[in-house]
Amino acid sequence: MTEQERGTREEWLAARVELLKREKELTRLSDELARERQALPWVPVDQEYVFETDEGKRTLAELFDGRSQLLVYHLMFGPEDAAACPGCSFFADHLDGALIHLNQHDVTLVCASRAPLEKIQAYKRRMGWRFPWVSSYGSDFNLDFTLFTEDQRRSGTGYNFGSARRADLRIAPAAPDGDEPMALSAFTLSDGVVYHTYSCYDRGTDVLIGTWQLLDRTPRGRFRAPSEAAASGGWPRRHDEYEDAAAAEG
């Protein structure tokens, strides 16, 4: 392990001021990118996707629940999986508290997975989540937005829109028939027409996870200990699989 540099308060302050300049550059760039995302052209969604929900069958337009904007997190949970992706579960832990704030900004958020609804409901109870979670089982929704084949990547419709190599993509065990990354898609409903406005994948969802952002501001970053980097890459577990969680439950 490399010994961390020590210094005086004056040395720290000088280094911190220099770092602050970079942080402000990133903040301004982030604001600029947000404006560019919002300026992307809207693409009409022609297909009538149908989802299984706790309230019965719903179309994509009906998932808006009376609002004009919809965020769909594509939570990796395939028909044959016993549990949802640990990374997606880590992200989902952050959603319940955000719902009321999103709703107040005319945004509905749902998660969508390829698993049948009954499997989703059982896992949702296990995790103690409250956010809306629907099943796209039997529809082409994931195929069209997150389940990418080699042909789709070559045509520019797949992961990172054809710009990434296969080796750049984490292949989900939930998707033996293609590559399924962590993903978020945005839609809007205008004059009765649903439009697709934005999607991001894999590391593009990283900034959406508050715990990562908090850990990035700690002395050791995303690892609890230096040895954990080699052992696990810092990847989180499902929240009921940590040793502390098991001991507390016991």
Image (tube, rainbow, N blue to C red):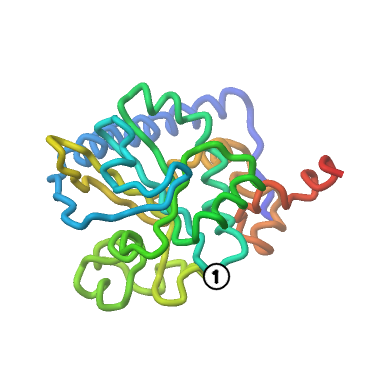
Residue 38 percent across, percent down from the top left? 20, 37
Q: Is residue 182 above or below residue 168?
A: above
Q: In the image, what residue occupies the spot 20% across and 57% down?
A: 47
Residue nearest the observer in this picture, 248 or 60: 60
Q: Quadrant of the C terminus?
A: top right
Q: In the image, what residue occupies the spot 49% across and 60% down?
A: 116
Residue type of the residue flagged with mark 1: Glu
Report whether residue 49 is seen. Answer: yes
Q: Quadrant of the N terminus?
A: bottom right
- Write down the quadrant of residue 208 in the picture: top left
Residue 54 percent across, percent down from the top left? 48, 44
Q: How many marks?
A: 1
User: As drawn, which residue projects farthest toward the right?
Assistant: 250
User: As drawn, which residue projects farthest toward the front?
Assistant: 56
Quick one: SS at disc 1? Answer: loop
Residue 212 percent across, percent down from the top left? 54, 42
Q: Which residue is mark 1?
A: 80
Q: In the image, what residue occupies the spot 69% across and 57% down?
A: 228
Left or right of 21 on screen, residue 82: right
Left or right of 33 on screen, residue 229: right
Q: Is residue 185 above or below residue 161?
A: above
Residue nearest the observer in this picture, 249 or 13: 249
Report whether residue 203 is seen. Answer: no
Residue 53 percent across, percent down from the top left? 44, 47
Q: Is residue 63 above or below residue 49?
A: above
Label 1 packing within 10 angstroms: few (<14), some (14-19), many (20+): some
